[in-house]
Image (cartoon, grey):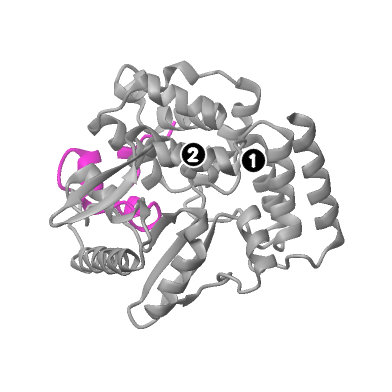
């Protein structure tokens, strides 16, 4: 059993990336002082979000802000109250290329895989991934440009886009308005994001716990969202890890929201829970330092969602679209990639 108050404030801050505000809330008293540098960085990043929003607005591009300063504001009323180092923006798929051009005009350059110029590579990238990264070296800012909320789920890209378009809302921070996900979709997105990373950082668990405790959530709408995403396993995984971190919530708001999913897929999620608990108890990231760790990571991802087409996409993206370290992409260079694409097309046709 791993309870958050039992973990030292230094480990919570340095490894799990919790801020002093969050750590002091967990302990119920002030046990650690805030960092002026961290607050200054957060304020600068929020200022960059305003700059990016204005630039996108002048080009007629709307976007949804994911996580980052707006999640901090929704949870605590303070954009500096949670730790983040980049901006995540979600545009419509048809606007991704235009948004990439705007970022480049602002002085951003591609970090790793950037938006390709060749139309064929653009189509492959948009089909098999959901984001590219940009960095502004002078401002020391990073923006992750998304054109799809999630890279791999059991839901088709078209259906996923439709769900997102129906579940966004606007919030105001001072004089500025921003688009964000609805409360129900935001919670599910955070659960899937944390689960995708094996809940290795407890900051993700605290985000979800705080969101459910402080925001109005429609349980029926949330259950409908989980069903649409076929994300029962991810919610069950969250429930198990959350019970370890917050053992006193057995009858609280979080438990009430997720109780219907507890134990829904016991055999699969038991293995996933065991793996996740092992990962975040190590206090350092070792998962990608060995072939066996990489294999366990892929196996975890394969178990995350049901469906043959989902599993085939995971395998293809991991081994054929990028190398096993995830550092480079080589679209179209491996013949097996084309066999995979043809097979996936056949599976999708048979499912209709």
**In the visual, does 50 lie left or right of 309?**
left
Q: Nearer the viewer, residue 157 or 184?
A: 157
Q: CA distance from mark 2 to mark 1?
A: 27 Å
Residue 29 forms part of the magenta stretch:
yes
Element marked by disc 1: helix
**Residue 43 location (% of width, % of height):** 21, 65
**Image location of residue 264, percent across then percent down:** 56, 18
The N terminus is located in which quarter? Answer: top left
Q: Residue shown at 18%/66% (left/top)?
A: 36
Question: Which span of residues is magenta-colored?
Answer: 1-30
- Residue 55 % position (x, y): 31, 70
Please state the horizontal and vertical placement of residue 278, each as a whole percent of the image. Answer: 55, 41
Question: Could you tell me which residue is drawn at 69 percent across and 32 percent down?
Answer: 307
Quadrant assignment, res 166: top left
Residue 300: image tag:
1
Give whichever of 334, 36 is nearer the camera: 334
| Residue 315 belongs to the span the image colors magenta | no
Q: Residue at x 41, y 72 (%)?
A: 102
Rendered view: 293 above or below 51: above
- Residue 274 appears in the picture as rendered: yes
């Amino acid at each position: 059993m791993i309870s958050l108050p039992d973990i030292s404030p230094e480990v919570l801050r340095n490894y799990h990336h919790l801020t002093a505000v969050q750590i002091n809330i967990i302990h119920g008293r002030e046990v650690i002082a805030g960092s002026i540098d961290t607050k200054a960085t957060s304020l600068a990043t929020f200022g960059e979000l305003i700059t990016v929003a204005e630039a996108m607005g002048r080009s007629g591009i709307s976007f949804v802000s994911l996580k980052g300063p707006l999640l901090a504001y929704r949870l605590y009323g303070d954009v500096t109250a949670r730790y983040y180092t980049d901006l995540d923006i979600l545009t419509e798929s048809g606007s991704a290329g235009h948004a990439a051009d705007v970022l480049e005009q602002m002085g951003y350059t591609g970090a790793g895989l950037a938006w390709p110029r060749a139309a064929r590579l653009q189509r492959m990238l948009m089909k098999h991934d959901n984001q590219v990264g940009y960095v502004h070296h002078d401002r020391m800012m990073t923006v992750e440009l998304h054109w799809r909320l999630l890279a791999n789920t059991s839901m088709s890209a078209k259906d996923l886009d439709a769900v997102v378009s129906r579940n966004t809302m606007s919030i105001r921070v001072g004089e500025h308005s921003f688009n964000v996900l609805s409360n129900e979709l935001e919670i599910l997105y955070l659960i899937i994001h944390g689960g995708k990373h094996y809940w290795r950082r407890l900051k993700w668990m605290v985000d979800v716990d705080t969101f459910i405790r402080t925001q109005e959530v429609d349980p029926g709408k949330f259950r409908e969202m989980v069903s649409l995403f076929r994300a029962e396993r991810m919610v069950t995984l969250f429930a198990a890890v959350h019970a370890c971190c917050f053992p006193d919530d057995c009858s609280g708001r979080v438990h009430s929201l997720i109780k219907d999913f507890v134990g829904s897929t016991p055999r699969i999620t038991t293995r996933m829970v065991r793996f996740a608990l092992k990962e975040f108890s190590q206090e350092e990231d070792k998962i990608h330092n060995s072939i066996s760790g990489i294999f366990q990571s892929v196996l975890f991802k394969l178990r995350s969602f049901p469906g043959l087409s989902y599993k085939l996409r995971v395998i293809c993206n991991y081994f054929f679209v990028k190398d096993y370290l995830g550092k480079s992409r080589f679209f179209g260079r491996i013949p097996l990639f084309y066999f995979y694409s043809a097979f996936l097309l056949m599976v999708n046709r048979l499912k209709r």
